[in-house]
Image: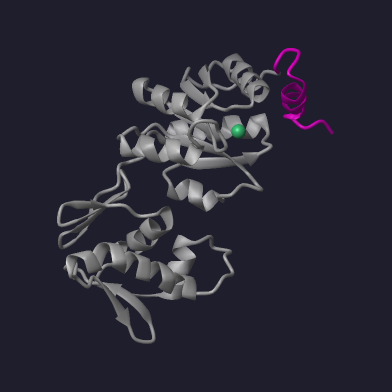
Amino acid sequence: MVRADEGWEEFLRNGSGTPPTLALEVDPVRVLLVEDEVRLADNVRRGLAAEGFVVDVVHDGVEGLFRAQVDSYDVVVLDIMLPGLNGYEVCRRLRAAGVWSPVLMLTAKDGEYDQADALDLGADDYLTKPFSFLVLVAHLRALIRRGAPVRPTVLEAGDLTLDPASRTVCRSGVELTLTPREFGVLHFLMRHRGDGVSKADILESVWDPHYEGDENVVEVYVSYLRRKIDQPFGRCAIETVRGAGYRLAAGGG
Ligand code: CA
């Protein structure tokens, strides 16, 4: 039996011949492809162009960030390991700049980050390399149908604010610098502000669901957070709930 995407795998591998036709009924859409593997990028571009997509290709993160900001793309396909600026940073900066084009991230199984990080940092979808061209097109179509993501609302607990869109945290109007993991823990606590949450809940939500590490890692991150959002301001937003976990004071401490 011949699988429908075998022609594509052949085409992507060899980079020669005419791309097979998928006969998709899609309106022309504008795609920005940020991929530093030149041959792969070129093959994907030709394949997508043959399907009626309008595709621009850039080969490094700095150029990708620039193009995604100045042009309006229906979707951005973003590799992670890129020269200049990695895909995670490109995605984070795009969201911080208020660019809401859907982002599909290309991840590698042996990467430093996992897919949960990709989604946490503002990507809308991901594909693991190597990917089938048919699957790429299906994901792109789904993202385009879904449209630009809705900008999430700013969370507030007193004078402590967290903006999931720009990934910024402020206390008394002062912007604080958090690592992605610290941000994830605080985001979880603020979504449940006023309620006690267990370390297991935090671990499951903020770390990979299959993470098998010790719950004490949550304590470590809570102590980091206290040093940033509470102690310099003489406040106590993150309360310890004996035998249970933590609670973020709804009033901000
Ligand atoms: Ca790469």
Residue 139, quarter of picture: top right
Visible residue check, residue 45:
yes
Q: Quadrant of ligand 1?
A: top right
* Residue furthest bottom as drawn: 243
Disc tally is: 0
Using the rendered image of the protein, determine whether residue 195 is visible from the camera's viewpoint.
no
Residue 183 % position (x, y):
36, 56
- Say which quarter of the image contains residue 244: bottom left
Q: What residue do we see at 56% from left, 51% from top?
A: 114
| Residue for point 45% across, 61% down | 206
**Where residue 197 sits in the image (x, y, percent)?**
36, 74
Specify whether 77 is left or right of 38.
left
Q: Pinpoint residue 121: horizontal percent, then vertical percent.
A: 43, 46
- As displayed, is residue 117 above or below residue 30? below
Residue 210 sits in quarter:
bottom right
- Looking at the image, which residue is at 57% across and 15% down? 49
Task: Tell me the magenta residue range.
Answer: 1-19
Which residue is located at x 54 percent, y 21 percent? 25
| 141 relative to 241, above or below | above
Q: Position of residue 123 (x, y in %)?
A: 45, 41
- Residue 150, relative to residue 116: is it above or below? above
